[in-house]
Image (cartoon, helix red, strand yellow):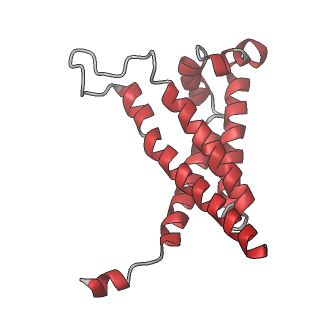
Amino acid sequence: MLKVLDKLPPQTFAIGTIRWSMLFIFAFFGVAKFAAYEAEGVAGIAMHYPLFSWMYPLIGVRGTSNVIGTIELTTGVLIALGAWSHRAGLLGGLMGMVTFLVTLSFSFGVPLWEEGYGFPFMGSTAQFLFKDAVLFAGCLALTLHAGNGLRNRAGFMA
């Protein structure tokens, strides 16, 4: 058993896997925000959310979705750059955490359980939102990795 454990890759392998998975998520979800179908879907939830509701009268459904998409794409790029820059990784990880905290907060005040069944049978909104808990955890891991990298580098230079 110990021989198998000796062959495990280092923990940085897991960080890399999380990093590139998060880039995949932010890239595809971010690009989708520029499409009409996604803009309408996001508006169904975000239009009544205080953080975004003020944007809809100013720049409309597509404009608001484009802003959200740009933030998501920027977050993905910063997370990717974290492979080479702890500062970029820290900022990207924090932005990712905020993104998923915001989407998880949509859970309050919307029907989460399947009509006619109730808890624990999730409706489509709950299925859409609850996955963000693990995505939040992934961004937390990347944030801690970058923060520790910055701290260690600062300690090395002292």
Where in the figure is residue 131, as x and y percent of width and height? 42, 40
Q: Quadrant of the C terminus?
A: bottom right
Question: Can you tell which quarter of the image residue 43 is in?
Answer: top right
Q: Can you say whether 39 is above or below 99 in the image?
A: above
Residue drawn at the location 25% of the way across and 27% of the way down: 121
Q: Is residue 136 left or right of residue 121?
A: right
Observer able to see residue 77: no
Where in the figure is residue 112, as x and y percent of width and height? 36, 22
Residue nearest the viewer, comparing 142 with 127: 142
* Residue farthest toward the bottom in the current orientation of the protein: 3
Where in the figure is residue 139, as x and y percent of width and height? 56, 50
Question: Can you tell which quarter of the image residue 116 is in?
Answer: top left
Where in the figure is residue 120, as x and y percent of width and height? 24, 28
* Residue farthest toward the front in the current orientation of the protein: 158
Q: Can you say whether 45 is above or below 89 in the image?
A: above
Residue nearest the viewer, comparing 40 with 58: 58
